[in-house]
Image (spheres, rainbow, N blue to C red):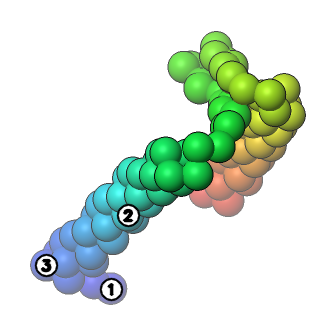
Amino acid sequence: MLSDEEAEDEGIGVSNRLLGFILLGITLVFVGVAVLVFASLVLGGQGSVGGVILIGPIPIVFGAGPDAGWLIAISVILTVVSVSLFLVLNRRNRKFRE
């Protein structure tokens, strides 16, 4: 058994790790956007964008450009797969706790 102090230290390590992953994710998003903006400005290319934003159970689908239809379809498929995995893993985790 862990003492209270050891359990607290272990919890802090997990929290710091989670914070590190969140900051890494935010940094990668900004770097990715900067690379795309730089490439479109330098190369003068035409780009497409598409995505899905979930606010609760309500999906907001958006897209623009010549290939937006494909991007929106891929975004919707990835969203459905992500939500399905979340529900399956959440149910499995609940059964494991009981």
83 shown above or below 31: above
In the image, farthest residue toward the left: 5
Residue 44: x percent and y percent?
58, 44
Q: Which residue does the numbered mark 2 point to in the structure image?
A: 24
- Name the side, left or right, on which 21 lies relative to 7: right
Tag 3: residue type? Glu
Which labelled disc corresponds to residue 5?
3
32 shown above or below 51: below
Tell me the residue at 38%/64% (across/down): 24
**The N terminus - image quarter:** bottom left
Q: Which residue does the numbered mark 1 point to in the structure image?
A: 1
Give the tally of numbered discs: 3
Secondary structure of the residue carrying numbered label 2: helix
Tell me the residue at 67%/59% (across/down): 96
Residue contact at pointers 1 and 2, CB within 8 angstroms = no
Secondary structure of the residue carrying numbered label 1: loop
Looking at the rendered image, the disc whose residue lies closer to the viewer, 2 or 3, is 2
Residue 81: x percent and y percent?
80, 43
Mark 3: few, some, or many residues within 10 Å (few <14, many ≥20)? few
- 3 and 52: which is toward the camera: 52
Looking at the rendered image, the disc whose residue lies closer to the viewer, 1 or 2, is 2
Which image quadrant is residue 48 in? top right
Q: CA distance from mark 2 to mark 3?
A: 29 Å
Looking at the rendered image, the disc whose residue lies closer to the viewer, 1 or 3, is 3
